[in-house]
Image (cartoon, grey):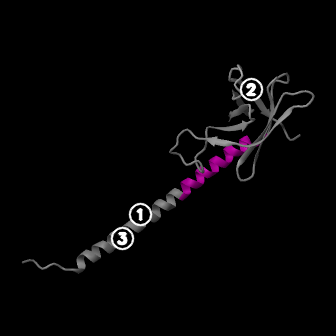
Amino acid sequence: MAITNPLYPIKKNVSMKKTLILFVVSTLATLSGWSQVQSNQREELISRYVGEWINIDPNTRGVTKVIITQEDDLSIKAFGKCSPNDCHWGPEKLHPISASVTTNANFIPFDYCIAIWDKGLALLGLKLKVTSGPIPELHVENFNIYKDGSARNNHHEFYIMRKRSNN
């Protein structure tokens, strides 16, 4: 009959626990550094959206201007062509949209942003994406979905905007 040392499993478990703790600590340290990189990328991307953007077509009959701000969240004010002054759609939350549901929206950069206004008779939406390049542009897709039972077709338009300079 073999005699076993009852202390051996305890020593083995202590050694395994130490290894596991070291693994978890090193993994968390690595991930926190990665999270900081992702967070920096997200903040840089958000800063590219923030500002006042003007439609490059001064004769547009659609969206003339958007103003994007950031406090805790991104928000947007949109303006459409009206006479004698442009119509203010009112402020709305701007939602960053990522390429995958599995990405963490708090850290991973996003692909574009959307905002939706419910105006009773219609839903008005904007999909926005900032381009890269020497002169960044804001590509804006505006869509209207009518809820009033009229015969109007739901439709969309596309606009290009440039950021108003601070000069």
Farthest residue, direction front: 149
Three-letter amino acid code at the position of disc 3: Lys
Residues shaded magenta: 32-51
Quadrant of residue 52 within the rendered picture: top right
Label 3 crowding class (10 Å Cα cut-off): few <14, some 14-19, many 20+?
Answer: few
Q: Is residue 35 magenta?
A: yes
Observer-nearest residue: 65 or 125?
A: 125
Q: Secondary structure at mark 2?
A: strand
Q: Which residue is mark 1?
A: 23
Label 1 crowding class (10 Å Cα cut-off): few <14, some 14-19, many 20+?
Answer: few
Instruction: Give how far across and how far down residue 56 sits, in percent.
Output: 80, 26
Residue at x 69%, y 45% (from the top left corner)? 46
Residue at x 87%, y 28% (from the top left corner)? 82
Measured in 3D between alpha carbons, the distance from the residue under mark 3 to the one under mark 1, in whole angstroms, is: 10 Å
Q: Which mark, residue 17? A: 3
Disc nearer the start of the sequence (3/1): 3
